[in-house]
Amino acid sequence: MDWLQIFSNSASSILSPATMAYALAALGLAVHFGFAGLLNMGIAGFMALGAYGYAISILTFGFPWWGGVLVGMGAAAVFALILGIPTLRLRGDYLAIVTIAAAEVVRLLFLTTAFDPVTGSADGLSGYHTSFRASNPIPAGTYGFGPWTFNAVDWWVRILGIVALALAVLVVWRLMASPWGRVLKGIREDEDAVRSLGKNVFQYKMQALVLGGVIAAVGGIVYALPSAVSPGVYVTSLTFFVYTALLLGGAATVFGPLIGSLIFWVLQTLLSNVLPAMVAAGVLPFMSQIQASTLRFILVGIALMLLVIFRPQGILGNKKELTFVK
Amino acid sequence: MATTRTTLAARAPRTIGVLLAAIAALFAIVMLTAGPASATTGADDDPFRISGNVQLDGEPLQGVHLTIDGPGGKQEVETDENGQWRVGVPEKNAEYSVTLDETSLPEGIAVVDPEDDTPNIKEAQVGAGGRVTVNFFIGEGTRNVTSFFDQLVQRIVNGLSFGLMLALAAVGLSLVFGTTGISNFAHAEMVTFGPVVAAALVSATTLAWPLYIGLPVAVLLSAGLGLLLDVIIWRPLRRKRVGVVQLMIVSIGLSLTMRYIFQFFIGGGTSQLPFSTTEKIPLFGVVQMSIVDMASFAICIVVIVGFALWLTYSRIGKATRAISDNSSLAAASGIDVDAVVRVIWILAGALAGLSGILYAYFRPGLKWDMGAQVLLLMFAAVTLGGLGTAFGALVGSIIVGLLVEISTLWIPSDLKYAGALVVLIIILLFRPQGILGRRERIG
């Protein structure tokens, strides 16, 4: 086994766009689930809208890349409004079922051959990079050291990803410390109590849904920035993986989603390298390499179960802040 | 009812050990039963090809619609600008039927072949080479199109069989929700478990048991899975008084775990149960059903009627409904809630496994994530009917089944599930408690 290569790959995933995308999506989910208590199971739908909004507005309507970003965020905001009106009055698990269904509808609409010229159906979309790469101020060449050596385009993606993440963290952090955030947490703890204080609970929930949705859409855009948009990514499993990352870090925290996503991806990369290598080296003799790479998803499922039973507050969280643990 | 109280009741949950044991046991079950099956499925999806060329007097026709049906399920394809089309299929040495949709041909043009009543449908034998070409004779002539009414009738029949199949699984999901409050995402994997085990028992390359023994045993093992999950996961968590949202997330974790365990053993491809491609027999009008379709229809009806009678008249059935209504009141009036919940898990497992086996014949083919593909339809059915009510789940399933099939008359068939889910969202807007649910259930 080439341990050096394996560790290098794993360390490299710390700065990968996928990690940042998960962190953004998990942060959006923290606003929904951790702070507002909304059991949104449709985060993959928000990410899909961000990614497709970005790609379609560039490819079909010829927008510049920053225009595409705005369209992606706008699409998620509109989706949140449409989704919120019928569903925010529903109880927790109803909301979960409706949001997961809505996200699946979004995915099927992108997947169907009916809109193939715009959405690319099963092939997805690619080749929307011209405007984004032209905006790159970094001169061509490779920079960095060790596992973090990337070319100019890769750095540009990563820098924008980090900037987006930092901005999102700042916004969420300040908002949650503000009176608005306190009302939101109040709604999570006891909706009726907040209502009796004269607050419009529905409005607050809606604002939280839109804010979290837009952050998740930015995550989807960061996911799409380096390569392509593929409908196979935005399945319900993506939602579940983002939940795993969020619960790992701490649902009702600002930095938990970051740490959770980081650990999730480093471990995923490590396992996806180590397990097949172990098979090749004959350490796991009873399985094939393909089976070994399936094994890590089994481990994700087990980790999610153990986490939610034994440490539902995650690494950073405070158990008192979790109303879903009763 | 109090006499059935078990002595197991007072045990403290040793949750870590128990969970690990659960996983190990799951592995063991799948390994014992499904292990040899991995030989039958290819790791790669659809390695073989059917292709063709649609031309009119040497001019390529673009955008002609073709449907390819056979082992691995139905696929649709359109010709490209050169008039060419091709699809990947999962099996060789198998028969596929290729149907050219004549409405997608230009005006006044049809498939012509004087020796054939239905020249727009051709049978293609994918031989040992794994590649076959299918061409149609295109010329001026009268079309061979099915009338709208005939199509509608065929869709209604299909929708009913799909709805009844869905109902088998949804009833269990609904009862589990009613008695324990769990929105069980892992129900999808309980559905997949049935055909996966069945394939291991009856496939010619593995144990090769006869169908009439193998399939019932697979249903029994599915019931065992329900029991196992209750004993090692759900009951300890009930004792721990874990909240419903937490339970839901646990079920998501369990769903991921089991789904990828299936993929671990049977791979990512589609494989077939024996007799999945039997001759279709014309019944009335244009309605055609194979023997397997009819048997599946009959099994669904018998099982559902039997289950409904059990739920209405038997003591445990009555207790189940009492618990769904008000669990504490039921416990106070001497019903052993734990024992009843266990029975519900066993039944839910058996019904889900049976539904999965029938679904594997309906699709046709079994796949590691086939349950997850219909999970949302089950939830839609259960929510439509009213969460926690068994008869609501039945009504909801039939509505969803009909909706999914009939909607393909107007919308593309790859959007048929989306249609059902949109209806779910709209109904919740106006009647959040579902069709048969009661207002207070929405909490």
Image: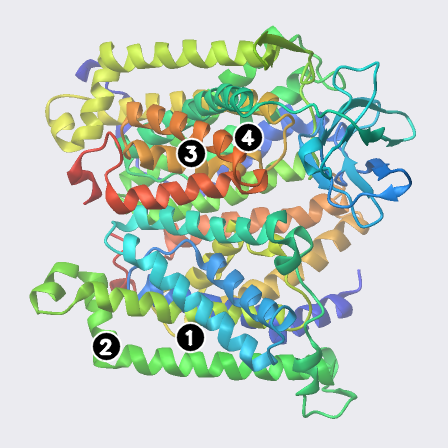
Mark earlier in primary sequence (4, 3): 4
Dot 1 and dot 3 within a common chain: no
What kind of element bears circle 3?
Answer: helix
The chain carrying label 3 is B
Residue B38 to residue B79: above or below: above
Residue sitting at 24 percent across and 69 percent down? A184
Residue denoted by label 4: B192
Q: Residues within 10 Å of mark 3 (few under 14, many from 20)?
A: many
| Chain under disc 2 | A
Residues packed near mark 4 inside 10 Å, few (<14), some (14 to 19) or many (20 plus): many
Which residue position holds label 3?
B378
Which quadrant of the view contains residue B19?
top left
Q: Compare marks 2 and 1 and give the one earlier in the sequence.
A: 2
* Amino acid at the residue labelled 1: Phe
In which quadrant of the rendered image does the C terminus of chain B lie?
A: top left
What's the mark number on residue A255? 1
Relative to B364, B151 lies left or right: left
Give the camera-side residue of A138 and A68.
A68
In the picture shown, does residue B379 fall above or below B217?
A: below
Which of discs 1 and 4 lies nearer the camera? The answer is: 4
Report, in whole angstroms, how far the alpha carbon at label 3 lies from the one at label 2: 38 Å
Q: What is the chain letter for disc 1? A: A
User: In front: B206, or B77?
Assistant: B77
